[in-house]
């Protein structure tokens, strides 16, 4: 095993170079003008695994973004492991808010900055490092599956799994798209919240009115919308929608000081909700208003606005059903319309939550690999965010053991400005994966 650790360290410089080249490709599937870049990144990923010795490498698409499937057959008696990552990235936002160009990887203080450095092109790099450490000949069957539209909700994933199920079938599935407790302590993700969202539109008038002539008599849509959105939480910030599921979370010490440090919570701003931080973050529902359409300040006039819209995003605790929760949200919005305002709810995306049974020999091997690579035991954690495709994998391959790992840490800022990867975490994650594959071959 010590030789494998040394080999990972030897291949990391070449892996980092390839990661940096991959980060330079602006693979934002959500931006139609950059979809050619997503195709270019898929080809780049395919070339990487062809170069490491995989004979069967394919770029596939089932009506959506291109995905890469690279296969190395299992030696006799050995299991097959599916290694997942995604090569698409979130839009970069305002480039002026980045400390360095978002698509030019830049190292500062042991971290590599750039969009996708961690989420999730580092997942590709982790798998590549493990394959290079084995000289392209891992001791187990390996299928690398690199998706191209995860950041857009994986709309064609179910079709990919259905059409290519024979290629993707595996005994163990390793999904490298999650967090670690810190840069020094790894995590195994054992639960994820689901997702449901909708757009709610409020109408109070069939046309705008002079606010001086009619203000105080008839309601404007923005005031009605604000009151409606405020009804989604109680005064303490707990979700006030009836009928939502709440589970239980692991007893992990998550202090108020860490919350403030991890989030950038402003001085004087308090946390919301009741219960422990893990309970609120991993096992309770959450509702957030993520966008509002109304007249901008620059275009405003003394007018009662007739209609306004908001996008509402809900996270669903493991054990809940996304479809039922979205229906509960719709019912709440329609029943809490102030002043008789007309409310229309348009449903959006759905993703089911997932809880993992993290016991058995595969998890024992994973914990041992993490202990050797990191020098400490992994912490079992939940994730407040959603990775809906995990439920898709579980449905497609019910007999497979699913491991959710990753290279992110509390300072990664995935989806935000100045996203970064801790280079030490990349080395430890790649080492743990390499050791795990070796262990699965000998168990």
Image (cartoon, rainbow, N blue to C red):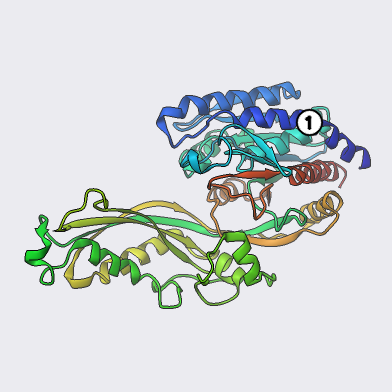
Q: Nearer the viewer, residue 99 or 240?
A: 99
In the rendered structure, the answer to whether residue 29 lies left or right of residue 190 reads left
The quarter of the rendered structure image containing the N terminus is top right
Q: Height in image: 199 above or below 174?
A: below
Residue 277, by quadrant, is bottom right
In the rendered structure, the answer to whether residue 77 lies left or right of residue 213 reads right
Residue 32 seen in this snapshot: yes
Q: Residue at x 86, y 54 (%)?
A: 375
> Percent from the top left, x then y, of residue 13?
78, 31
- For the image, the number of numbered tags is 1
Residue hosting label 1: 13
Q: Height in image: 270 above or below 112?
A: below
Residue, far right: 2
> Percent from the top left, x then y, of residue 432?
80, 46
Q: Residue at x 84, y 49 (%)?
A: 373
Q: Nearer the viewer, residue 356 or 94?
A: 94
> Percent from the top left, x then y, of residue 342?
18, 63
Say few, some or many: other residues with alpha carbon within 10 Å of mark 1 (under 14 / 14 to 19 / 20 or more). few
Q: Residue at x 44, y 37 (%)?
A: 30
SS type, badge 1: helix
Q: Height in image: 402 above or below 103?
A: below
């Amino acid at each position: 095993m010590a030789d494998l650790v040394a080999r990972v360290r030897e291949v990391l410089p070449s892996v980092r170079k390839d990661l940096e080249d991959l980060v330079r490709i602006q693979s934002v599937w959500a931006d139609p003008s950059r979809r050619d870049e997503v195709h270019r990144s898929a080809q780049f990923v395919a070339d990487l695994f062809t170069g490491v010795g995989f004979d069967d490498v394919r770029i596939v698409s089932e009506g959506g973004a291109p995905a890469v499937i690279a296969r190395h057959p299992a030696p006799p008696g050995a299991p097959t492991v599916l290694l997942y990552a995604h090569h698409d990235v979130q839009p970069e936002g305002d480039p002026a808010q980045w400390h360095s160009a978002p698509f030019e990887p830049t190292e500062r203080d042991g971290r590599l900055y750039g969009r996708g450095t961690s989420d999730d092109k580092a997942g590709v790099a982790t798998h590549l490092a493990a394959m290079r450490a084995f000289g392209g000949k891992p001791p187990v069957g390996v299928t690398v599956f690199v998706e191209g539209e995860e950041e857009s909700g994986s709309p064609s994933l179910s079709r990919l799994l259905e059409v290519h199920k024979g290629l993707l079938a595996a005994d163990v599935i390793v999904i490298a798209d999650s967090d670690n407790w810190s840069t020094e302590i790894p995590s195994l993700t054992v639960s994820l919240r689901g997702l449901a969202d909708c757009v709610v539109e409020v109408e109070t008038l069939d046309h705008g009115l002079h606010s001086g002539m009619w203000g105080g008599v008839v309601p404007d849509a923005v005031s009605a919308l604000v009151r409606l959105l405020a009804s989604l939480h109680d005064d303490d910030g707990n979700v006030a929608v009836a009928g939502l599921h709440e589970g239980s979370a692991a007893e992990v010490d998550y202090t108020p000081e860490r919350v403030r440090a991890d989030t950038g919570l402003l001085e004087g701003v308090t946390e919301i909700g009741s219960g422990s931080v893990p309970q609120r973050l991993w096992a309770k529902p959450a509702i957030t208003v993520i966008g509002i359409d109304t007249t901008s300040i620059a275009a405003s006039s003394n007018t009662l606005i007739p209609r306004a819209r908001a996008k509402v995003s809900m996270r669903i605790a493991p054990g809940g059903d996304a479809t039922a929760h979205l229906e509960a949200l719709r019912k709440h919005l329609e029943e809490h319309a102030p002043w008789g305002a007309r409310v229309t709810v348009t449903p959006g995306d759905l993703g089911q939550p997932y809880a993992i049974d993290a016991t058995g020999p595969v998890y024992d091997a994973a914990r041992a690999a993490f202990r050797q690579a990191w020098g400490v035991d992994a912490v079992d954690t939940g994730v407040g965010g959603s990775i809906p495709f995990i439920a898709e994998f579980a449905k497609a391959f019910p007999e497979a053991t699913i491991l959710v790992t990753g290279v992110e840490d509390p300072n990664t800022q995935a989806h935000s400005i100045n996203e970064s990867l801790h280079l030490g975490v990349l080395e430890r994650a790649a080492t743990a994966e390499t050791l795990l594959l070796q262990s699965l071959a000998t168990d």
